[in-house]
Image (spheres, grey):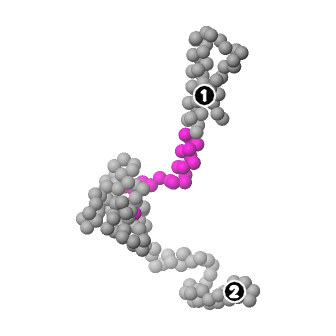
């Protein structure tokens, strides 16, 4: 709701200074409440979408290889976009982290949280069955992918 910058009607002008000051203070209080309400709505909107990342010393992370930081590692678009895992050595506030980075990278080891992603261990062999598209499907995954599957009447497609 827009703020009425002229809360006093022209017909009802009161030349009493104290009353005018009180009216203007009231307008400023309303403005401040509206700004706080808008800021809270903005925070709520973007906090959930982006989320918060936090790492502790000893955690393993991926480092995003941006051209600005690693010009020699990002020579073309087919190069990997992240490298790791690297160990977090120290946390500076909520945004900066000291990473145990080998000397071959030639950059300082402090990174913003936006350039880091958590590293997850490889999936163990016995848990691979849980990764099927359809957990109720029996049989060999590769065998099922090479069979013909009808797409529409009259057309067949061989999945490879």
The quarter holding residue 97 reads bottom left
Q: Nearer the viewer, residue 154 or 7?
A: 7
Residue 17, label in figure? none
**Residue of label 2:** 150
Residue 2 drawn at (x, y percent): 64, 33
Q: Residue at x 37, y 68 (%)?
A: 74
Which portion, as a residue range, is magenta? 39-64
Q: For the view shown, which residue lies furthest in the left direction? A: 103
Number of residues whose C-alpha sits closer than 10 Å to that of mark 2, classed few (under 14), some (14–19) or many (20 or more): few
Q: For the view shown, which residue lies furthest in the front direction? A: 10
Q: Residue at x 65, y 22 (%)?
A: 7
- Asked if residue 73 is positioned above or below residue 148 in the image, the reply reads above
- Residue 50 falls left or right of residue 117: right
Q: Is residue 54 magenta?
A: yes
User: Of helix, strand and loop, which one carries label 2?
Assistant: strand
- Residue 128 falls left or right of residue 19: left
Sequence-first disc among 2 and 1: 1
Number of residues whose C-alpha sits closer than 10 Å to that of mark 1, classed few (under 14), some (14–19) or many (20 or more): few
**Residue of label 1:** 30
């Amino acid at each position: 709701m827009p703020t009425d910058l002229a809360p006093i009607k022209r017909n009802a002008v009161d030349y009493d200074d104290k009353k005018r000051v009180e009216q203007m203070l009231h307008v400023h209080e309303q403005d401040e409440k509206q700004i706080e309400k808008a800021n809270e709505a903005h925070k709520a909107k973007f906090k959930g979408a982006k989320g918060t990342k936090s790492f502790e010393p000893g955690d393993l992370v991926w480092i995003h290889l941006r051209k600005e930081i690693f010009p020699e590692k990002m020579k073309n678009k087919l190069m990997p976009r992240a490298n790791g895992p690297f160990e977090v050595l120290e946390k500076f506030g909520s945004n900066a982290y000291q990473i145990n980075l080998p000397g071959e990278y030639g950059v300082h080891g402090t990174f913003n949280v936006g350039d880091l992603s958590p590293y997850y261990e490889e999936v163990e062999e016995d848990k691979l069955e849980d990764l099927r598209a359809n957990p109720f499907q029996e049989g060999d995954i590769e065998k099922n992918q090479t069979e013909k599957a009808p797409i529409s009447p009259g057309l067949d497609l061989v999945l490879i």
